[in-house]
Image (cartoon, helix red, strand yellow):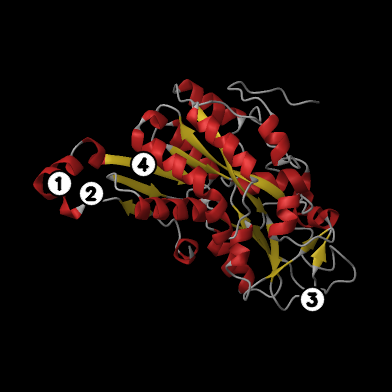
Amino acid sequence: MTRGLSIRAAVVVVAIAALAACGGEGQQQAGGGAGSEQIAIDGSSTVFPLAEAAAEGFGQSQRGGARVTVGESGTGGGFGKFCRGETQISNASRPISAEEMAICAGANIQYVEIPIAFDGISVVVHPSNPVSGVTMAELRRVWEPSAERTVTTWRQVNRSWANAPLQLFGPGTASGTFDFFTEAVNGDGGASRTDYTPSEDDNVIVQGVAGNAGGMGYFGYAYYEQNRERLKVLAIDGVTPSPETIASGSYALSRPMFIYVNAEALRRPQVRRFVDYFVQNAATLAPRVGYVALPADAYTAIGERVGNSQTGTAFGGHNEVGLSITELMARPLSSEAALVPQ
């Protein structure tokens, strides 16, 4: 997992070999149908560590002849590949959008939406920064579009803070974390100041904040967990992100993370085995890489969804803030985009 968090656009290749003792007959079988199976995963850098762990665990536990690759091009980039049929699974730190739904529909690609774990977007600063917490209103003053080239010091955000330069780092616009954060903080997904250092690689954000005394950035909780000695995480409205506050929803930037599986690909035995493995082991893998597992009954329901190949999304093509996993699992799935209430 540490390796997965330290390499830009890392690609994990898991080769599942046939039994070495099978002799010539076994080698021929491994080189045929199942032996040539490839499973391509791409998308969210936030979900990447969890998908990487699942791929590695699957490779160690199976004897099937599949080859699983995991890339990180951002949620938007991953959906682009997924809707072109280039990948079988898409990692996403937000739900599929209405535009992406339309593109997939145009390519006759149906999908199974799988909430896989919980995350809490973590707002971090340099360890030397005396600020220990912010309010949502203060975050808005930092990141709203009108702050661009206007709010440039910490004191402009809060008069009690130092008159020091404010240096911002965050995800690029292809990131699901960017979409969720701007929706939660600014009230409009995609609405943000642009005079900050963007990157689809969360490690670049880590390095930027760790190397600048006036730095602030945000990313998934796992990246803070792996860099506690280099960064300070801020409480939001008095609540600090932790496995407990994320699971309870008391932390304001808690959110579900997803994988989307191509329904046609799910019919292939190796893809089905991998997805089953991922769902069955997510509760163990999630905390290992710094995320929060869903309740056991949620994974049971998700397993049934996979078994029945239930397609569609519970979000109607729109991101939502503050939705609990219980509410999410109770919603019907649909392949049609829903109208946004005015």
> Gap in Å between the C-alphas at discs 4 and 3?
47 Å
Mark 1 element type: helix
Q: Point out the frontmost of discs 2 and 3.
A: 2
| Residue 29 seen anywhere in this rendered image of the structure | yes
Few, some or many C-alpha atoms within 10 Å of disc 4 (few <14, some 14-19, many ≥20)?
some
| Residue 200 seen anywhere in this rendered image of the structure | no
> Who is closer to the viewer here, 314 or 175?
314
> Gap in Å between the C-alphas at discs 2 and 4?
17 Å
> Gap in Å between the C-alphas at discs 2 and 3?
56 Å
Q: Point out the frontmost of discs 2 and 4.
A: 2
Question: Which residue was labeled with disc 1?
Answer: 27
Vertical comparison of 272 with 206: above or below: above
Mark 3 element type: loop
Question: Which residue was labeled with disc 2?
Answer: 18
Between disc 2 and disc 1, whose residue precedes?
A: 2
Between disc 3 and disc 1, whose residue precedes?
A: 1
User: Is the residue under label 1 in contact with that under label 4 (CB below 8 Å)?
Assistant: no
Question: Which residue was labeled with disc 3?
Answer: 130
| Amino acid type, callout 3 | Pro
Mark 4 element type: strand
Quadrant the C terminus occupies:
top right
Between disc 2 and disc 3, whose residue precedes?
A: 2
Question: Which residue was labeled with disc 4?
Answer: 39
> Gap in Å between the C-alphas at discs 3 and 1?
62 Å
Residue under the point 73% across and 60% down: 241
Between disc 2 and disc 4, whose residue precedes?
A: 2
| Amino acid type, callout 1 | Gln
Few, some or many C-alpha atoms within 10 Å of disc 2 (few <14, some 14-19, many ≥20)?
some
